[in-house]
Amino acid sequence: MSRTDRGFTTLFEFNLSKLNFSHGLAPRKKQRMCFRLTVLSRISCCNPDPLVPIRRGNGSANSNEKKGENWRLDSKNSLHKVRVLASPAMSFASAQSRFSSKQQKFYPQCTPRNSGPQSRDTLPTRDTGIANEEDWEISLLNENVNESGTNEDGSTWYRQSGEDLGENGYLRRWTMMGGKSHDGSSEWMETWWETSDWSGYKELGVEKSGRNAEGDSWWETWQELLHQDEWSNLAHIEKSAQKQAKSGIENAGWHEKWWEKYDAKGWTEKGAHKYGRLNEQSWWEKWGEHYDGRGSVLKWTDKWAKTEVGTRWGDKWEEKFFDVVGSRQGETWHVSASGDRWSRTWGEEHFGNGKVHKYGKSTTGESWDLIVHEETYYEAEPHYGWADVVGDSSQLLTIQPRPRPPGVFPNLDFGSSPPQLDDQT
């Protein structure tokens, strides 16, 4: 089976005096060439760690020094990690501490009654992808609840649960909880839900938000759903997550959107959009993967950054393969505050016979164009696919819809026309 190292090509290091790049002219398995760019001047070999601003801790630091540490640039967190369970490197270790205490925090306060849930003033963690449903430990109450109270420290809490009914067997069960500190300087809210109807649609989700006494604020949502295509009756599972946080003491914040889509024939789509800011520096990243379930694969990454003085830099690449034949291409670029531009473009054509055409050029006059003999590596199938997502979605799959009366059939929307079939066989 063909496969490849993902070949992420650019690692940004933010520094007011130096701008560091790592770029693979030919992204091959376990082989990468790097270049350091010092404000558009010299280029030399380097191997910088990726620097990514992350939010850590629970937002309850007592000093600006600790707050600064929480919003620092972290050299141990990669911009490009895709959470796939089949890959040991993509473990959820960074998020375990946050999720592992969920059960201890909630259930002791739910039993006995009239004792409120503890404060959840913890910000989400960057670059952890989409959690599994077992990490959230969603446990909906089986009865309608509307209760509130005051803790010994003066903080207040509330907890509610209920059901919403609608047409076509629509049923939404939900539990919501939240609270405030005694002086109102911090507050939090969290909602769990599950949704179903007679068409076979099922959904499981979480939304949480809050702010703390230091002024940090955050919002996070997680969702997975099951539905069936009306024309083919093919099952689909989708997972998504959005996270954002903003510092209360400096111009810093970030936002991430992740999604994964699967169908029972092996079609898979994954992607993420990310944005971050730390004082005078801002950066963006987008990436995507698409597998058609028949051997065709498309992957791409585009990321860029800028400073308030006008300096900009970035990197992008794309690869397309089918049956060992395909191509890769990319560009690394930099624009100075005065408008001077430097760039290097590169490309590869893989013919499927052991020969690869490599070519490229840069604005400094370098160029190459040659045929080499080497093996082609790429990932024809996702590390984490349909069988994996089904195995990790047991709570979603076991959601029970409302009983359907005899003679009542689900209302299916087939749209105006059936989907178009691909010409590729």
Image: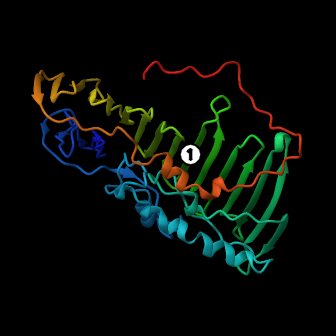
Residue shown at the point (80%, 61%) measured from the top left: 161
Could you say whether the residue bearing mark 1 is in a helix, strand or loop?
strand
Q: Residues within 10 Å of mark 1 (few under 14, many from 20)?
A: many
Query: Amino acid type of disc 1?
Result: Ser
Q: Is residue 375 left or right of residue 296?
A: left
Q: Is residue 58 left or right of residue 107?
A: left
Residue shown at the point (68%, 59%) measured from the top left: 190
User: Where residue 160 sits in the image (x, y, percent)?
Assistant: 80, 63
User: Where residue 88 sits in the image (x, y, percent)?
Assistant: 35, 58
Q: Is residue 321 above or below residue 203?
A: above
Residue shown at the point (70%, 55%) measured from the top left: 399
In the depicted view, which residue is nearer to us: 149 or 138? 138
The answer to whether residue 254 shows anywhere in this view is no
In the depicted view, which residue is nearer to us: 393 or 156? 393
User: Where residue 419 sits in the image (x, y, percent)?
Assistant: 60, 22
Quadrant where the image shows the N terminus: top left
Q: Is residue 131 above or below residue 309?
A: below
In the depicted view, which residue is nearer to us: 186 or 384? 384
User: Where residue 293 sits in the image (x, y, percent)?
Assistant: 44, 35
Residue shown at the point (10%, 23%) measured from the top left: 370
Total marks in image: 1
Q: Residue furthest front?
A: 407
Quadrant where the image shows the C terminus: top left
User: Which residue lies under the disc numbered 1?
Assistant: 240
